[in-house]
Image (spheres, helix red, strand yellow):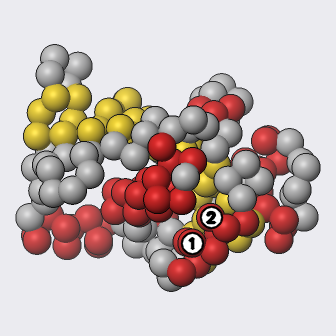
Amino acid sequence: MPWKELNTPSDKEERALDLQYRGKARFIVDESAGVEVARILQRFGYNAKFVGEFGLCGHSDEDIFAAAWKDKRILVTHDSDFLDNRRFPLHRNAGIIVIRPGSSGRDNEGLFACLSKAIAFGSHASWFRGRTLEFVSCELITIVGRGGRYRYLWPEGNAQAMIWED
């Protein structure tokens, strides 16, 4: 199946989503992403902490995942290990944003674009719960959740976002 334009939600649909998903997203930033990512999110006005603030530098991925779940924080990382749903099950996932190594999200401009799009998908904590967002590039996003896997193409500029239909 081809790419299909993604319709922009109406004002009524946006209000319904705001009512359904309450509570502003809070973030924990993995060592692989770095402390500067936490600072960027803080400048956006989000409660963002670096793993070092939890004393988790050098700890295993499972420890960081558990801390994110316990503190209800969305994990931001470059570590593609977090895409393994067997190690990091969706039902215990407060939300994961993986900006893949080697993607255009590694430079500051690309990283900023990926974070902006992740927040645009859902600025509410409960929207992220049980979902993993994978940025292959600034424009290509895969969201995995209990409802399935969805691929989005969100070109730079004013181009219409698109969804891949299987």
Instruction: Indicate left or right for 101 with 151 as reference.
Output: right
| Kind of residue at disc 1 | Ile
Judge the density around disc 2: few (<14), some (14-19), many (≥20) Cα neighbours within 10 Å. Answer: many
Q: Is residue 56 visible?
A: yes
Which type of secondary structure does the marked residue at label 2 adopt? helix
| 3D distance between C-alphas at marks 2 and 1 | 5 Å
Residue depicted at 67% across the width and 53% down the height: 33
Q: Quadrant of residue 140 in the image?
A: top left
Between 156 and 81, the one lying in front of the other is 156
Judge the density around disc 1: few (<14), some (14-19), many (≥20) Cα neighbours within 10 Å. Answer: some
Location of mark 1 (residue): 40
Instruction: Indicate left or right for 10 with 64 as reference.
Output: left
Asked if 104 appears above or below 25 in the picture, the reply is above
Q: Do the numbered discs 2 and 1 sit on residues whose CB atoms are within 8 Å?
A: yes
Q: Quadrant of the N terminus?
A: top left
Location of mark 2 (residue): 37
Q: Quadrant of residue 124 in the image?
A: bottom left
Label ID, residue 158: none
Residue depicted at 54% across the width and 81% down the height: 43
Residue 46 percent coordinates (x, y): 54, 77
Q: Quadrant of residue 151 in the image?
A: top left
Instruction: Indicate left or right for 31 with 107 as reference.
Output: right
Q: Quadrant of the C terminus?
A: top left
Between 22 and 152, the one lying in front of the other is 152
Number of marks present in the image shown: 2
| Kind of residue at disc 2 | Val
